[in-house]
Image (cartoon, helix red, strand yellow):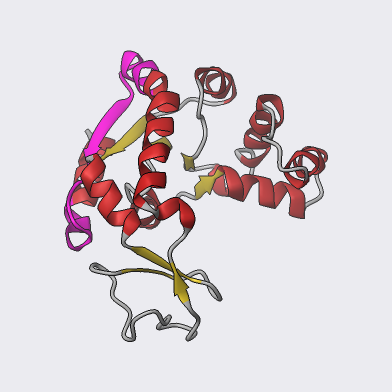
Amino acid sequence: MNIVLLGSPGVGKGTYAKRISKIYNIPHISTGDMFREAIKNKTEIGLKAKGYMDKGELVPDDVTIKTVEERLKKDDCKNGFMLDGFPRTIAQAEALDKIIVIDKVLNFTASDEVIIDRLSGRRVCKSCGAIFHIRNIIPKTEGVCDNCGGELYQRDDDKPESVKKRLDVYREQTEPLIEYYKEKELLADIDANKPIEQVDEIIADVRKALEE
C-alpha cells in the first residue's frame, strides 16, 4: 500500500508512522531520510542536493522529485511505503502521480491548542536527541535525559510563538494539497487530538481508513 502522510508539526506523525510501518511492513520515508541516503550513496542526485543543503538553500523541486523517484525504486518499497514530508505542493503531488499510484492519504489533525501544548512542553536531549515532555513523557530527573544523562532543552521552534507561526505556514502550504487529494477521493482525516496514552485508538482509526 502506497501512503502519503499529512499533518502539522507536533501532530504525532512520527509516532503513528512507526506503528503503521510495523503493522504493514512498509518503510516510513521522510524527505530528510531520502536526501541523507542519496548523499551517503554519493548518487548524482545526492551530490546535487548536498550542494544546495550545504549552502543552506532549499532543494529545488526537480531535484527533490528525482530523489523521491530513486528512493521508491528500492526493494523495501515493493510492498508499499509511507511518504512523510513529500509532497508539499501541488506541483510535487502532480509529479508524484506520474511516478507511482498513491492508494491513500492520511491527514492527521489536531487543534492548535493541542499542538501548542505538545510542542511547547517538549524537551530534547542535547547529547542523544531523545524526546521528553514536561507532562506526558516526564524524565526521572528534571532536565536530565533518562537514556544518556545529557542535558534536556527546549528548541527555539518549540516555543509557543514559534509554534503558532509554524502552524500558519503549514496551513498555507498544505491546504491546497488537502483539497487536491480530497478531490481524488484519497484523503482520510484522522483525529489526532487524543493524548499519547490513547495512541492505540488513533492507530485503530488508521487501520480502518486503510482497509475500508
Q: Is residue 86 left or right of residue 5?
A: right
Quadrant location, the N terminus = top left
Query: Residue 38: image x %, image y %?
Result: 72, 47
Of residues 89 and 114, which is closer to you in this image?
114
Q: Is residue 66 above or below residue 16?
A: above
Of residues 136 and 190, which is closer to you in this image?
136
Q: Is residue 65 left or right of residue 173?
A: right
Query: Residue 174: image x %, image y %?
Result: 41, 27
Query: Residue 178: image x %, image y %?
Result: 36, 23
Name the image quarter holding residue 105. top left
Q: Please tell me whether residue 189 belongs to the stretch shown in magenta.
A: yes
Of residues 85 and 161, which is closer to you in this image?
161
Q: Is residue 110 something one can see in this rendering?
A: no
Q: Is residue 152 something one can see in this rendering?
A: yes
Query: Residue 184: image x %, image y %?
Result: 35, 15
Q: Residue at point 32% right, 47% down?
A: 11
Tell me where the magenta segment starts and ends, as one range.
178-201
Name the image quarter holding residue 112. top left
Q: Residue at point 45% right, 26% down?
A: 173
Q: Residue at point 46% right, 49% down?
A: 26
Of residues 92 and 60, which is closer to you in this image?
60
